[in-house]
Image (cartoon, rainbow, N blue to C red):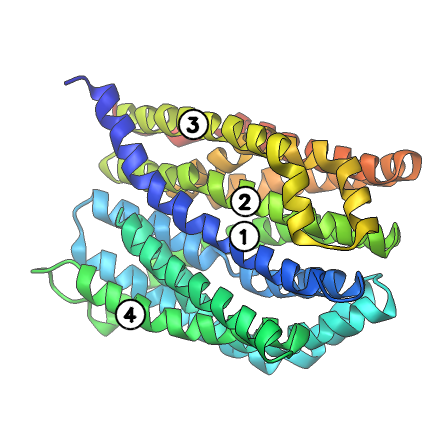
Amino acid sequence: MSAQPTINRRVWNLAWPVVLSNLTVPLVGAVDTAVVGHLDAAFYIGGVALGSLLFNYIYWGFGFLRMGTTGFVAQAKGAGDGTEVLASLGRALLLSLLFGGTCLALTAPMADVAFSILDGSDEVEEAARSYFMIRVWAAPAALCNFSILGWLFGMQTMRGGLIQQVFINSVNVALNLFFVLGLGWGIEGVALATVIAQYAGLLVGAVLVWRLAPRGVRRPRIREFAAVRRLKAMMAVNRDIFIRTLAVLTASAFFMNESAKLGDTVLAANAVFLIFKSVAGYGLDGCAHAAEALVGEAIGRRSRVQLRTAVIATTKGAAVLAVLMTVLFFAAGTLFIDMMTSIQAVRDVARDYLPWAAVIPLVAVWSFQLDGMFIGATRGAEMRNGMLIALALFIAAAYPLTSLHGNHGLWAAYCLFLLVRAGAMALYYPRLERGLAG
């Protein structure tokens, strides 16, 4: 049997559970949008969008707990170091609890600062604040779940991640419908459903770690959790990924804030398209996560050939998936819009901008794949630099384009951001191969 079918099969076996589990995440967002989208005003949709945006700044700002953990665990696995596999998870969980507790302690000042910056209408901001102040209580559990998911991905046990994510998101959707449609709790019910789902998912994650942890290896000692060299390496990578993630979130926040300036109806339409972006992002992440695991393993084994094989195979799979998603968005986009909202004005505006949302998978796939490669190699500095360059150009381009072409200009600037992000990281790629054996 040739090597290529073997690696293609490995990529598929790693990618499909992640694609399936990831697609349940935008399903939750879709339900969030749909249940408030059928209330009597567009500002409810905008409130959930802006509330989620602020919450994402907190949660995904600490996304390095997932990404950094995957890279370190994959490399420890590739090197055959079971003790370090466990120690990497322990360090990540300690950081998760520390950061989660800090988020709770600083909830009020964070909300005050955030809502002084955003430019939504009074009704949108009031709804978003109610959503934010409840959902933030999920922070400790959500960050621990990030670390556990990163560990599962690094161990190449993607089906364990599928179990955890599907459980969390299924509970979230069920409670969402019950609290909002059954009990009439409105936007507060949407937030509370997420809080309960995250803590329930943490229990499932703990069981998965216990069942999948390496057997027959020495358990890490306390001093190994606090090993200075390991902690410095983790914090250096995490710092760079943190800056990179803040840049991603800033781009999203800037996009939504500029949308808000164009009026509640445009904001609501772009909020509907956040579901399209989420489907594309979480779906393409399947191949990106496969790249993380396989690239990390190749780096751990110091093999250039294995690295190149992983890069080619995962990128080909991602490109095929991106084409399929774009075809789906063009074919069924109008139906999706109508499912998300019954407000005719929002439907009409969304249809005008549907082509932009539909091509996002083809534009975004390259940056997603390169992210996966650099995460697996724990090369955070290159990711950080590429993202900062792309963010600066996005903001610089968005102001004149939006002024001249409105929402079309804003979408054009966002697509430019994704392409520049990929191009900058592609220039850094040779660094991944340096120092590896043939």
Which label number is shown at residue 370? none
In this rendering, would 273 be left or right of 22?
Answer: right
- Circle 2: residue type: Val
- Circle 3: residue type: Thr
Tell me if mark 1 has few (under 14), some (14-19) or many (20+) residues whose alpha carbon lies within 10 angstroms of its own.
many
Return the x and y of residue 249 as percentages of the image width and height.
Answer: 64, 53
- Circle 1: residue type: Pro
Mark 2 vs 1, N-terminal side = 1
Tell me if mark 3 has few (under 14), some (14-19) or many (20+) residues whose alpha carbon lies within 10 angstroms of its own.
many
Q: Which residue is mark 3?
A: 315
Mark 3 vs 2, N-terminal side = 2
Q: CA distance from mark 3 to mark 2?
A: 18 Å
Q: Are marks 1 and 3 in contact (CB under 8 Å)?
A: no
Q: CA distance from mark 2 to mark 1?
A: 6 Å
Tell me if mark 2 has few (under 14), some (14-19) or many (20+) residues whose alpha carbon lies within 10 angstroms of its own.
many
Q: Are marks 2 and 1 in contact (CB under 8 Å)?
A: yes
Q: Which residue is mark 4?
A: 206
Can see residue 332? Answer: yes
Q: Nearer the viewer, residue 236 or 162?
A: 162
Q: Which residue is mark 2?
A: 279
Is residue 263 shown above or below 44? Answer: above
Q: Nearer the viewer, residue 380 or 209?
A: 209
Give SS at disc 1.
helix
Give SS at disc 3.
helix
User: Residue at the location (43% across, 43% down)?
Assistant: 375
Q: CA distance from mark 1 to mark 3?
A: 23 Å
**Tag in front: 3 or 2:** 2
Give SS at disc 4.
helix
Q: Which residue is mark 1?
A: 26
Mark 4 vs 3, N-terminal side = 4
